[in-house]
Image: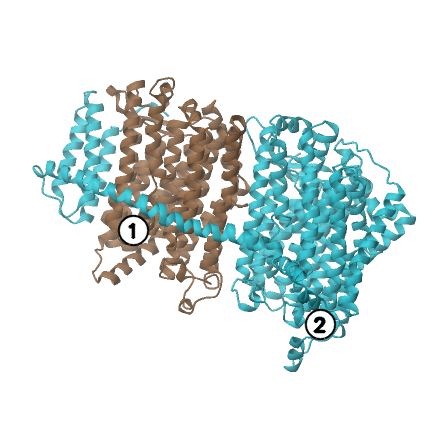
């Protein structure tokens, strides 16, 4: 089929990312027509993405999704498969693409209110729409290169939007309060790009290794030929494990997982709408998506073809996920910036998704469930976390501060936002029957299912503890924001006549819709207990099963025994109690003062400062990579470049003086001294004499005396013509070379052409 | 017919015209450089279309038949990209030079109080054209004597340009530049002459005959050292930051992107391809050396405050990438080298152009004295970002694909070779973060943050300066989205040459 026909036949998967990109490019032009028009155009382009993404949904229900659609050859590799531009339309990509497009649209609408009046909106819309396009491209690509292009594209937008307030005015700085360092937005954007960039290059390394052995980068081909290339890589002991880990580091960077998680908290320097979309709901899920996308290959390799090292892929990501979930949840406990609490929470929740994908592959029967749980949690988290961020945006907008100690008692001022944020927080904490409960339950269940692997038990304990922490920090955040007394800051605002009020409908309606969906998905989960056809989890499971079937992977689906399910639910409840009890004491009933407790015990103080300093990872990274690099460059400059190479060069110029002296003394007999031109001229002469020598060597022997004689004669004439002003000489140089070439070539064709 | 010779002769014959017309045309003399270069570009494009059908395009002229010397001009899948890049850069920089050199001369008059000789414009463009001819001739040459001739022709006018129109201690630095490159050229000559001793021919084609001779590694090394000096790889790099920083900025925008990379092309042409078995033997050492060049250049770039010195060191680092592709001695890697020459050419030309804009509009080269300029010069800021993305290999710019190919080749040959080679490859790819790091840091220091009060009056550059750069940026993005334009030529040609 010709490219155009491919697109016309299945417009959805193509247009849904092409149109937002075109929209982004047209923003500066539309801006010329009017600001209002530009804003509506942005909403319109985002809406088109929703329409075309949704046009793929029916294929999901019928089961006849188009699969891999290839447009045209992008690069031809001699001896390898050609790399084609294509989209892969299967349940995984359809589901994620719809989540992305839908949430993007809601946040675009929210932005119209939130960013109202910003003078740089054109830039904002450009990056925003460009992001939507690239994110959908990433999700729908059928090969790793295209994924990487979308991947870098969203990274670029993330960089541009985190650093959106590039003027770095003090009120936009993040971090603190002093003495904790504060970072300006442009620094934060750079940090995000560089840290994720580190992940990207590791990912690239893995891709090169895979490409070397597989000869293709198309997902379908990669999965079909997985046993072959996995065996080939595994032939060198250790190489496959290395490849798997290098590969995973890319998703770790993008999805802010340990050890590359430190950029996400700083990414909150951007506008809140950006944090909601890019740094909570969509872009940071790209890593999860990619891990899920490649997992069938490794599953096939280990469980069906006995490539031992392929298991590293799963055990590594399971470990990373569980550890990150705990690490970030613990940091969220002490953070004082509203958005940063949510950012840590995002990191922690993505850890759950990674964990689910990882533990799934640890047993043969658990794979489908793990994949399902990961994807289900991705969807459900996207809904409630986007809602949380949008609420937080309204709150920050209202109180003009990023710190939770500047809030408090907002419930009466912002009742709608309070209600919606409460539901979203409860969903995050996993309170039944909200969506978060079901998806977290699925993650727990897949951990328990693979508990025959010794690693899984430990991971489950970490994950469960993180759930308790999640509830605790949710309560803290809620209470500090909405309950209790108004802070000093609010009183001052009110005193200065700045009345805190509810957000405008254009802002709260989008998050109201998200919260409704959170409740809806939760209720469907509840109904699913009775009627399994309506269970969202079972729906996703069925779709994943379908997809794997299409890829010719026949998974053995383990029937989950009721006791296991019961164990998952009861551990969920236990963890809620474990987290909820102190939460109730500290933050709801306020019977105990957490800060008083901490300041009285040196152990707790130690823990607090450990958490406050982000387990000392952030300072350590700065010390090693930033300060280290800056010191190193000074050392290299002052220790190597200046003392060694510069001196070498000086020595060379002294040598030049000697040589030129010799040359000059030779030439003094024939020509006027050329003091006016100085030493460089001597070197031109040197090179010209060299030509002369060459010409003699080559051409004299060829009896072709006339040409070089003329040239040399001219050369001598030129020299006599020298008058001392260099610019005059230039003409003669020009003439010499023109004539040298023209004469030497002796312009007549001797054949060829 | 006669197309490639015209590519040399037409600009060459415009050189004296430009010189003579300079007195009356003044700044508009630039058009006398633009016209012949525009003409040669159309010629080259027509040649490129012909090559697309498969066979290389060769013109042979009689030179010294008795000595078995012919004057051949070759455009094939490899050289055509070099030619097009050089031509496009020279063409656009000739436009860019018009406002820039006027500014330079005004500044000069202001500084010295002397009146500028009206012929200065003519001299500048005459040299400029000669320089362009030198570069294109080097790329097209088919025999070693011809190659050497053009190689020197490339050097002399560029020296004169630095010496006449540069900044700072231009005479001393001009000499330093001349000397270093010349010493390299002499070593190269030694290699060339010894190859003649072995094969009895000066044809580049005949270099294959060197393989198997006990002299082969020595010849390879001699020739390569010559080119490494040109490329300014680690250890042979000291002249580069001085020359590129103190050259008049349009010339920096040709020296750095167009000229030094020719060293890499020539190394591929003269050694990596014909002496492939020998080159493979050096693979590990060269990749280490390349890695060192990348890292060293990157670190030194971080240490600079002068924006032009910063860009110059960044070029050293980027030459490390070209070197890395060469070190792989495989089709992918060498294609990547040529491809990255194109990307780096576009990107670095944009960046030097931006440096020139900053010199004209802000009046300083010190990064410390800048800041917050994105407000005042949004277009320049976007150009800078695109320039850095191109050299840093961020899609959708061309740099992404070219780096992809370099590393694809490197990993391919490393995986077939040894664990050490794989380790070097992984370290090398991780070190690419350094490029992103110094790029973003510099962007941030120049364009973001609060605007210092003394820069309140800064204005966006005139379109005559930004439009040429914008065209380069567009080419970079188009090439990034549709790399087949370039890779198809390169890969099939190299696969044929290396098989």
Q: With respect to residue B325, does A322 lie above or below?
A: below
Instruction: Tell me whether circle 1 and circle 2 mark residues in contact (CB < 8 Å).
Output: no
Of circles 1 and 2, the one toward us is 2
Res A102 seen here: yes
Q: Is residue A385 left or right of residue B165?
A: right
Looking at the image, is B209 positioned above or below residue A470? Answer: above
Residue A600's tag is none
User: Which image quarter: residue A422?
Assistant: bottom right
Instruction: Give the alpha-carbon distance from disc 1 to disc 2, as whole Å.
Output: 71 Å
- Mark 1 packing: few (<14 Cα in 10 Å), some, or many (20+)? many
Q: What residue does disc 1 label?
A: B29
**Secondary structure state at the residue bearing disc 1:** helix
Say which of A429 and A291 sits in front.
Answer: A429
Image location (x, y in percent) of residue B267 = 38, 31
In front here: B61 or A218? A218
Return the residue found at the far right: A530
Name the quadrant of the C terminus of chain A.
top left
- In this rendering, position of residue B236 left or right of residue A539: left
Rendered colour, chain A: cyan
- Give the letter of the chain under mark 2: A
Quadrant containing the N terminus of chain A in the rendered view: top right
Residue nearest the observer in this picture, A234 or B77: A234
Relative image position of residue B311 (x, y in whole percent): 40, 49
Which residue is label 2 attached to?
A408
Tag 2 secondary structure: loop
Q: Colour of chain B?
A: brown
Residue B157 screen position, x and y as percent = 27, 43
Outermost residue on the left side: it is A669
Q: Residue at x 28, y 60 (%)?
A: B106
């Amino acid at each position: 089929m010709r490219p155009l026909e491919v697109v016309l036949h299945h417009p959805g998967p193509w247009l849904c990312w092409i149109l937002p990109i075109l929209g982004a490019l047209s923003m500066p032009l539309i801006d010329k027509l009017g600001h209002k028009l530009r804003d509506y155009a942005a909403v319109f382009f985002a809406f088109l993405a929703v329409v075309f993404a949704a046009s793929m949904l029916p294929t999901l229900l019928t089961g006849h999704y188009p699969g891999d659609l290839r447009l045209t050859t992008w690069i031809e590799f001699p001896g390898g498969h050609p790399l084609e531009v294509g989209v892969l339309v299967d349940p995984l990509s359809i589901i994620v693409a719809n989540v992305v497009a839908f949430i993007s649209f809601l946040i675009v609408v929210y932005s119209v209110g939130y960013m109202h009046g910003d003078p740089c909106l054109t830039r904002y819309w450009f990056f925003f729409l460009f992001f939507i396009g690239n994110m959908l491209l990433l999700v729908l690509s059928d090969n790793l290169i295209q994924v990487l292009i979308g991947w870098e594209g969203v990274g670029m937008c993330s960089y541009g939007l985190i650093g959106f307030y590039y003027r770095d005015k003090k009120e936009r700085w993040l971090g603190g309060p002093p003495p904790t360092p504060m970072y300006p937005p442009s620094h934060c954007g750079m940090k995000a790009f560089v840290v994720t960039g580190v992940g990207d290059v590791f990912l690239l390394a893995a891709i090169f290794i895979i490409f070397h052995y597989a000869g293709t980068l198309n997902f379908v081909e990669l999965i079909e030929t997985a046993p072959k290339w996995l065996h080939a890589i595994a032939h060198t002991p250790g190489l496959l494990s290395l490849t798997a880990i290098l590969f995973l580091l890319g998703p770790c960077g993008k999805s802010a997982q340990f050890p590359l998680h430190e950029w996400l908290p700083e990414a909150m320097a951007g506008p809140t709408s950006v944090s909601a979309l890019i740094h909570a709901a969509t872009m940071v899920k790209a890593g999860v998506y990619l891990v899920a996308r490649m997992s069938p290959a490794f599953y096939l390799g280990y469980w069906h073809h006995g490539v031992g090292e392929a298991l590293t892929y799963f055990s590594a990501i399971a470990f990373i996920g569980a550890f990150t979930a705990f690490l970030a949840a613990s940091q969220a406990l002490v953070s004082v910036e509203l958005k940063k609490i949510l950012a840590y929470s995002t990191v922690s929740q993505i850890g759950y998704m990674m964990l689910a994908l990882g533990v799934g592959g640890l047993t043969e029967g658990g794979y489908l469930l793990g994949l399902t749980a990961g994807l289900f949690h991705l969807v459900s988290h996207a809904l409630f976390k986007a809602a949380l961020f949008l609420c937080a945006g309204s709150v920050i907008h209202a109180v003009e501060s990023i710190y939770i100690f500047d809030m408090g008692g907002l419930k009466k001022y912002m009742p709608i936002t309070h209600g919606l944020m409460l539901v979203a927080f409860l969903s995050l904490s996993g309170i039944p029957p909200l969506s978060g409960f079901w998806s977290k339950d699925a993650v727990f269940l897949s951990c328990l299912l693979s508990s025959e692997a010794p690693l899984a038990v430990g991971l489950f304990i970490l994950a469960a503890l993180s759930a308790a922490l999640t509830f605790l920090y949710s309560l803290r955040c809620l209470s500090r924001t909405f309950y209790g007394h108004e802070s000093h800051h609010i009183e001052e605002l009110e005193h200065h006549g700045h009345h805190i009020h509810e957000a405008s409908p254009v802002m709260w309606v989008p998050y109201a819709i998200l919260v409704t969906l959170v409740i809806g998905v939760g209720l469907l989960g509840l109904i699913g207990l009775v009627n399994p056809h309506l269970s969202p989890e079972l729906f996703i499971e069925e779709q994943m099963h379908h997809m794997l079937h299409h890829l010719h992977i026949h998974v053995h689906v383990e029937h989950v025994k009721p006791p296991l399910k019961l164990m998952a639910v009861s551990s969920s409840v236990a963890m809620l109690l474990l987290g909820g009890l102190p939460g109730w004491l500290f933050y709801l009933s306020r019977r105990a003062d957490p800060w008083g407790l901490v300041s009285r015990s040196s152990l707790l103080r130690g823990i607090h400062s450990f958490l406050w300093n982000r387990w000392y990872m952030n300072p350590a990274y700065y010390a090693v990579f930033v300060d280290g690099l800056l010191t190193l460059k000074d050392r290299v400059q002052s220790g190597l470049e200046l003392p060694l190479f510069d001196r070498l060069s000086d020595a060379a110029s002294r040598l030049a003086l000697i040589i030129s002296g010799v040359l000059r003394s030779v030439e003094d007999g024939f020509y006027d001294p050329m003091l006016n031109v100085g030493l460089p001229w001597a070197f031109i002469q040197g090179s010209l004499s060299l030509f002369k020598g060459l010409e003699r060597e080559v051409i004299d022997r060829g009896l072709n005396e006339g040409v070089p004689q003329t040239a040399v004669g001219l050369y001598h004439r030129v020299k006599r013509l020298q008058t001392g002003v260099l610019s005059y000489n230039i003409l003669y140089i020009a003439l010499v070379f023109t004539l040298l070439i023209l004469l030497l070539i002796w312009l007549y064709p001797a054949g060829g052409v | 017919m006669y197309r490639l010779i015209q590519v040399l002769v037409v600009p060459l014959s415009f050189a004296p015209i430009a010189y003579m017309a300079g007195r009356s045309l003044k700044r508009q003399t630039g058009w006398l450089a633009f016209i012949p270069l525009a003409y040669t570009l159309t010629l080259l494009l027509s040649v490129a279309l012909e090559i697309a059908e498969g066979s290389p395009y060769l013109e042979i002229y009689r030179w010294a038949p008795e000595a078995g010397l012919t004057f051949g001009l070759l455009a094939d899948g490899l050289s055509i990209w070099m030619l097009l890049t050089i031509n496009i850069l020279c063409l656009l920089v000739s436009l860019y030079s018009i406002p820039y050199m006027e500014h330079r001369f005004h500044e000069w008059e202001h500084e010295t109080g002397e009146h500028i000789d009206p012929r200065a414009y003519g001299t500048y463009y005459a040299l400029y054209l000669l320089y362009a001819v030198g570069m294109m001739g080097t790329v097209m040459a088919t025999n070693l004597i011809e190659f050497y001739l053009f190689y020197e022709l490339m050097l002399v006018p560029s020296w004169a340009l630095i010496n006449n129109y540069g900044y700072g201690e231009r005479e001393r630095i001009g000499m330093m530049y001349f000397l270093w490159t010349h010493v390299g050229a002499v070593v190269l000559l030694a290699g060339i002459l010894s190859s003649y001793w072995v094969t009895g021919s000066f044809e580049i084609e005949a270099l294959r005959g060197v393989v198997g001779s006990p002299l082969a590694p020595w010849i390879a090394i001699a020739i390569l050292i010559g080119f490494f000096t040109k490329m300014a790889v680690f250890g042979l790099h000291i002249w580069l930051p001085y020359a590129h920083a103190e050259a008049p900025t349009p010339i920096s925008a040709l020296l750095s992107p167009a000229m030094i990379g020719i060293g890499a092309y020539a190394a591929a042409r003269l050694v990596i391809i014909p002496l492939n078995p020998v080159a493979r033997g050096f693979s590990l050492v060269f990749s280490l050396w390349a890695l060192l060049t990348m890292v060293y250049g990157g670190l030194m770039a971080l240490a600079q405050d002068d924006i032009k010195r910063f860009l110059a060191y960044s070029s050293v680092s980027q030459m490390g990438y070209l070197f890395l592709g060469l070190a792989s001695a495989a089709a992918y890697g060498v294609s990547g080298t040529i491809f990255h020459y194109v990307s780096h050419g576009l990107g670095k030309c944009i960046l030097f152009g931006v440096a020139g804009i900053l010199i004209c509009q802000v009046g300083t080269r010190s990064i410390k004295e800048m800041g917050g300029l994105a407000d005042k010069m949004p277009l320049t800021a976007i150009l800078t970002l695109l320039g850095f993305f191109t050299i840093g290999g961020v899609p959708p710019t061309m740099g992404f694909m070219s780096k992809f190919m370099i590393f694809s080749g490197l990993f391919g040959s490393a995986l077939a070779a040894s664990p050490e080679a794989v380790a070097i490859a992984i370290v090398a790819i991780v070190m690419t973060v350094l490029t992103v790091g110094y790029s973003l840091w510099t962007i941030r220091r120049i364009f973001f943050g609060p605007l210092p009060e003394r820069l309140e009056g800064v204005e966006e550059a005139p379109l005559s300066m930004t439009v040429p750069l914008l065209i380069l940026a567009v080419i970079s993005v188009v090439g990034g989205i549709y790399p087949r334009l370039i890779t198809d030529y390169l890969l099939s040609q190299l696969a044929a040459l290396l098989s």
